[in-house]
Amino acid sequence: GLLAYWLGAETTMIRAMVVSITQMCTYDQVTIFLVPYIEGVLRHLLASICAAIVFASFSLPFDIIKTRAQQGNSKSKNIFVAMSKIAH
């Protein structure tokens, strides 16, 4: 029905928050760290690569939960319960 459009909406929003926080914070911190050592485009390239690695590492569990919730395969209504089931 109509409510099927909202399957996984909560997990999608939580994933979006994790993605935004990890990308922006990691990029900023690595850029600040590299200021004394590297200038120009290379500094931003290295900061972007580091941010992408951190983002991929932190967002993968949320991607799995989001996909399961959107497919309707998740039996649990709470994202933290779903995470604990994946971890075991």
Image: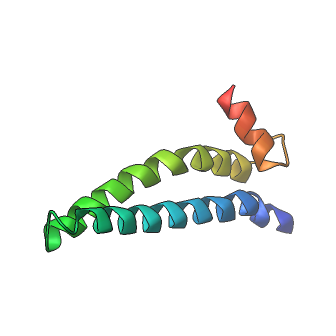
Q: Is residue 22 left or right of residue 79?
A: left
Residue 20 visible in the current orientation: yes
Which residue is drawn at the image coordinates 76% and 66% (left, top)?
Answer: 5
The percent position of residue 76, horizontal first and vertical second, equals 84, 42
**26 vs 6, nearest the viewer:** 26
Q: Is residue 53 above or below residue 83?
A: below
Q: How is the image coloured?
A: rainbow
- The image quadrant of residue 3 is bottom right
Which residue is drawn at the image coordinates 73% and 35% (left, top)?
Answer: 84
Residue 74 visible in the current orientation: no
- The image quadrant of residue 9 is bottom right
Question: Residue furthest toward the front?
Answer: 36
The percent position of residue 86, horizontal first and vertical second, equals 68, 33
Question: Residue furthest toward the top?
Answer: 88
Which residue is drawn at the image coordinates 53% and 65% (left, top)?
Answer: 21
**27 vs 18, nearest the viewer:** 27
The percent position of residue 13, horizontal first and vertical second, equals 67, 65
Which residue is drawn at the image coordinates 69% and 25% (left, top)?
Answer: 88
**1 vs 73, nearest the viewer:** 73
**8 vs 79, nearest the viewer:** 79
In the picture, the quarter occupied by the N terminus is bottom right
